[in-house]
Image (spheres, rainbow, N blue to C red):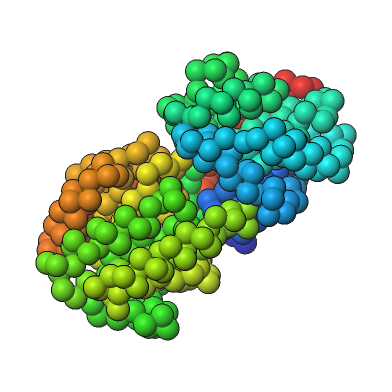
Amino acid sequence: MAVLEEYEKIIGSKEIAEIKSLAEDLKGKRILIINSTKVGGGVAELLKSYVPLMNDLEIHAHWITIPGNDTFFSITKKIHNSLQGGKETLSDKEWEYYLKINEEFAKTINEEDYDMIIVHDPQPLASILYHNHTLPWILRLHIDLSSPNRETWDKMLPWIREYDHIVVSSEKYANEDINSGKKSVIMPAIDPLSPKNIPLSREKCGLILEQFKVDPTKPIMAQVSRFDKWKDPLGVIDIFEIVKKKHKDLQLILLGGAADDDPEGMMILEEVRKRKESSLYKDDIHTILFTDDYLVNAVQRLSDVVIQKSIKEGFGLVVSEAMYKNKAVVGSDVTGIAMQIDDGLNGFLVDPYDYNGFAEKISLLLRDKELREELGKEAHKKVKENFLITRLLKDWITLIREYVYIYE
């Protein structure tokens, strides 16, 4: 893992010095960070980068995951979908099981061992209910809370209010039910030194993709995302078929996987594979299961157009990843993606249900290399200035300072 000094060539020595100065008083402080998985999904991606950086600054960050089984994660997937506006609701028995797992997990945590506890997303959210709450607890919700299913939201709201502070990705997610004095916005970020984002030559990218029967000499359209209904991979195939009629050599790559805490993922992948087999262009549709970060890097770098057709998106780190690689992304005009793309300046935003609109922008970029490069240059600049892991680290250190000292 990279240490802070390695980012100096990207963000400059002044910014590095400021981060170190902010962290100075936190040396030796013990922070427990909890989420549901260390593999797959944006939360694991973030923690994998900034937890080591916190430790490099001598803030003792300890990252653990709530243990669960398929039953538990099926329930928490329902909660996730419902909080993003889905119609799913939980039965009394499902809520009981969710609380049971959280209670069992909470028993493994000794508050006296830490100065702060940070909980990510709904899976371990209820663990706070089984503690004396003798130190600050922070809840980080990464999902789109702009229009939650009220039944689920009302059930969880008393638990959410147990936390000292709520962190969301956008002001639009700062639900009015949450006390305005205990919430803040911290946008996610990418790690420029991760294998996903380091420079790779076109030749090396081509060799990686040839292993998956992709022709690196022909145009590529790609979406990199978990196989999840909110990412709408079936809709991506529909759009590809529209564009393919005009761009005969075009190939589609759907690269993704399923997080350990997402039992729906493999079912969605099977739907995608069936849809591919029914397509007239099935030989040019490549569904690839995630194998490593270099594969993501290669796909994004070799793609002529990157698409992100999410129906809802808390943020969407893959958008910033592609933009950092000088790619013009055609993304859905939903909050998380619109935070990153400035329509017409560094990419395009399209209504998620406007398939012809997506096809039009993709076709435009495929035809106009100069436009692709111009938008891509601006895209890289936007990410460098706003969405790098060092900025995220600085935001968290600032928040931790506030609460650690409140309780001393």
Q: Give above or below for 391 relative to 401.
A: below
- Name above or below for residue 115 compared with residue 359: above
Let me know if residue 15 appears in the view. no
Residue drawn at (18%, 67%) of the image: 244
Question: x%, y% of residue 3?
Answer: 61, 56
Residue 406's x, y, as percent? Answer: 72, 20
Q: Which of the pair 350/69 is nearer the observer?
A: 69
Residue drawn where x is 23% and y is 77% of the image:
218
Q: Work out whether residue 164 or residue 8 is closer to the camera in this orientation and state it.
A: 164
197 left or right, relative to 221: right
Looking at the rendered image, the quarter that the N terminus falls into is bottom right
* Quarter of the image where one finds residue 224: bottom left
Q: Is residue 57 left or right of residue 19?
A: right
Q: Looking at the picture, does residue 331 appear above or below residue 107?
A: below
Occupied quadrant, residue 363: bottom left
Instruction: Evaluate whether residue 85 shows in this view.
Output: yes
- Image x and y of residue 246, in percent: 12, 67
Q: Quadrant of the C terminus?
A: top right
In the rendered picture of this protein, how many numbered marks are placed on residues?
Answer: 0
Image point (48%, 46%), residue name: 189
Image spot of residue 278 (x, y percent): 31, 70
Please name the residue shown 49% across and 29% down the image.
Answer: 148
